[in-house]
Image (cartoon, grey):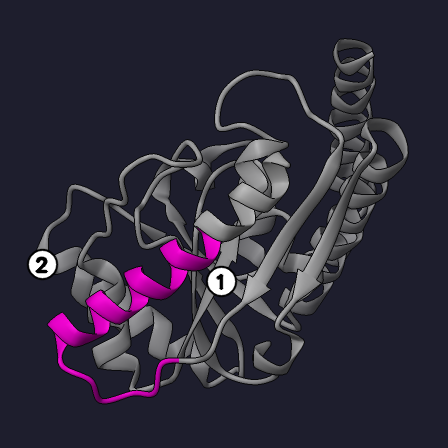
Amino acid sequence: MVVLRSALFAVWMYATLILFGVGCLPMIGVRRGALWAIRGWSRGILWGLRVIVGLKVEVRGEQYRPKGPALVASKHQGELDGIAPFVLLDDPCFVLKRELMRLPILGWYAARSRMIPVDREGGSKTVRALSAAARDRLTEARQIVIFPEGTRQVPGAPPDYKSGVSALYRDMDSPCVPLATNSGLFWPPKGLLRYPGTCVYEFLEPIPPGLKRADFMRLLEERIETASTALTAEGRR
């Protein structure tokens, strides 16, 4: 049943991507229109997961969910982590790989909704451009979403936090809201299988601005990894 449900969900996912992507093209002349279309598709994906796969998405830590401009540093275990925040947050702006901007449909909407592309090999020049873009998006009262490890990690893998998040934290002078998850148990980083259960996204206590880099990185990793490990253990029971 897992294989059949996963196959049906894959059909649903790509069919709705084409329908939304093509059908909403007239709306992407403005950022809000593009974001509305992405959010609509994301809601459809969560509906498909619940009805077809039997996977529910639960949100915890609502008291910490940012309502205005903020930096959100999220654990990244699978593709769902790039979809769910469009439903969880009011106006998310992802920091993403530049290559994704070249994809048909997804790249078009990412560009029109003013996501922040980065060249991961660009060094200090990339960090400066990233910080400038993030400060610009903050003027729109958006939530800047970054994956501190840069790429998807299998649940339980040793953490590998990169310095880009600390540069954003320093230059944005904004609270950083850690976001933990166990999504990789149900939508793994690789493969087509999707598993039933309850995927949890948990907003954690914000880290106030102004900490030294080392203190910030230690606290961020500690909060995200501790909570994600607990959620993973819960999801495996």
* Residue 119 image point, x, y percent: 25, 45
C-alpha gap between disc 1 and disc 2: 26 Å
Residue at 29%, 60% in the rendered image: 221
Task: Please state if 173 lies on the left or on the right of 77 as rendered.
Answer: left
Residue 221 magenta-drawn?
A: yes
Residue at 16%, 41% in the rendered image: 121
Q: Is residue 16 above or below residue 143?
A: above
Task: Please state if 62 lies on the left or on the right of 51 as rendered.
Answer: left
SS label for mark 1: strand
Q: Is residue 181 above or below residue 145?
A: above
Camera sees residue 108:
no
SS label for mark 2: helix
* Residue 233 image point, x, y percent: 53, 42
What is the quadrant of residue 210 in the picture? bottom left
Residue 179's disc is: 1
Pick the front one: 95 or 204: 204
Dominant SS type (magenta): helix
Which residue lies under the disc numbered 2?
A: 124
Residue 139's disc is: none
Q: Nearer the viewer, mark 1 or mark 2?
A: 1
Considering the image in quadrants, where does the C terminus appear? top right
Residue at 41%, 31% in the rendered image: 154
The residue furthest right is 51
* Residue 173 image point, x, y percent: 29, 87
Pick the front one: 159 or 110: 159
Residue 22 magenta-drawn?
A: no
Q: Is residue 82 above or below residue 62?
A: above
The region drawn magenta spans 207-228
